[in-house]
């Protein structure tokens, strides 16, 4: 096992995630998130490497939920997170299912992946919107491109800008909404101001521009989720309900007219030749 501690300032994002790491999984343990995560995996699976010896990096790995699924699929994984306590949780989760010596655990800011070898990974995943939480999403995308092999794929999620409009309406603050619409910037809505880290949100067109301007080719873009099922959790409490509503969701998720109402945007993009 490699457990690397890279230098980084303990930012508001790190403080928040260090604090919540031990109970983070519990916050996402309900019928909606089971349904949501099953969709995430269905959208991700087609981009798993065909070579069983390929390496995968989980950027913003959190407690290792997705890294563990990657390991179960037979791949060596490198877990990277700004929060050292999240990295520790990921290590503990993976060591229950596989020898941790086969995997790497790194505490680092995604905007500085210099501790990782260039052209190393066949697949990078960045789920839970970590790229938009960095100081410069464009710089972060270029860092990710550097560590991917030629033809390597990134699967990532981004906060959808249009999903944030209700928050500013509830505040009744047109000036704040105007600023938000202009630059897409908001912050994590935790009570402690010292933990309110900035977030950059993206409209679907913004994501396309970000991908194309940082050396990637867009392969897939889905809205996740178009159906606002977090407000109707009772509808997905049974396996039958989850399957029925997932069928409808999958008919909507790539519809350009429907994607704008989704909470998040999940993309797959491939490194373009230089």
Image (cartoon, rainbow, N blue to C red):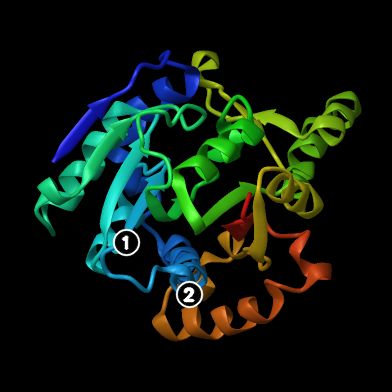
Q: Quadrant of the N terminus?
A: top left
Q: What label does residue 214 carry, if any?
A: none
Camera-side residue: 259 or 204? Answer: 204
Q: Which residue is mark 1?
A: 54
Label 2 SS: helix
Question: Which residue is found at the position 70% from the left and 40% from the top?
Answer: 201
User: Can you say whether 96 is above or below 39 in the image?
Assistant: above
Give above or below for 72 relative to 81: below
Is residue 63 visible to the viewer in this orientation of the structure? no
Residue 63 spot, x, y in % from top left: 31, 44
The reply to whether callout 1 and callout 2 are in contact (CB within 8 Å) is no
CA neighbours of label 1 inside 10 A, class few (<14), some (14 to 19), many (20+): some
Q: Quadrant of residue 8?
A: top left
Q: Is residue 222 left or right of residue 74?
A: right
Is residue 153 rendered to the left or right of residue 269?
A: left
Q: CA distance from mark 1 to mark 2?
A: 15 Å
**In the image, residue 226 lies at what x, y percent?**
68, 66
Seen at 81% across and 31% down, the residue is 183
Query: Percent x, y for residue 245?
Result: 57, 80
Q: Position of residue 10 (x, y in %)?
A: 41, 15
Residue 46 circle label: 2
């Amino acid at each position: 096992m490699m457990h690397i501690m890279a230098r980084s300032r303990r930012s508001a994002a790190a403080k928040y995630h260090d604090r919540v790491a031990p109970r983070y999984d519990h916050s996402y343990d309900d019928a909606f998130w089971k349904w949501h995560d099953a969709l995430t995996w269905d959208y991700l699976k087609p981009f798993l490497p065909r070579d069983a010896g390929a390496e995968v990096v989980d950027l913003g790995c959190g407690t290792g939920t997705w890294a563990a699924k990657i390991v179960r699929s037979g791949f060596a994984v490198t877990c990277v997170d700004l929060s050292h306590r999240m990295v520790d949780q990921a290590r503990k989760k993976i060591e229950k299912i596989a020898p941790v010596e086969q995997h790497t655990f790194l505490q680092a800011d995604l905007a500085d992946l210099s501790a990782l070898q260039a052209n190393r990974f066949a697949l990078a995943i960045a789920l839970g919107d970590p790229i938009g939480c960095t100081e410069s999403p464009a710089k972060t995308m270029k860092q990710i491109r550097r560590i991917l092999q030629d033809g390597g794929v990134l699967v990532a999620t981004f906060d959808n800008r249009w999903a944030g409009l209700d928050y500013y309406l509830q505040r009744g603050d047109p000036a704040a909404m105007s600023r938000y619409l202009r630059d897409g910037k908001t912050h994590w809505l935790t009570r402690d101001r010292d933990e309110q880290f900035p977030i950059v949100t993206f409209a679907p067109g913004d994501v396309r521009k970000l991908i194309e301007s940082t050396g990637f080719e867009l392969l897939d873009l889905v809205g996740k989720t178009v159906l606002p099922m977090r407000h109707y959790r009772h509808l997905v409490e049974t396996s039958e309900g989850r399957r029925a509503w997932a069928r409808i969701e999958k008919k909507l998720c790539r519809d350009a007219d429907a994607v704008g109402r989704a909470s998040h945007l999940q993309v797959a993009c491939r490194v373009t030749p230089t």
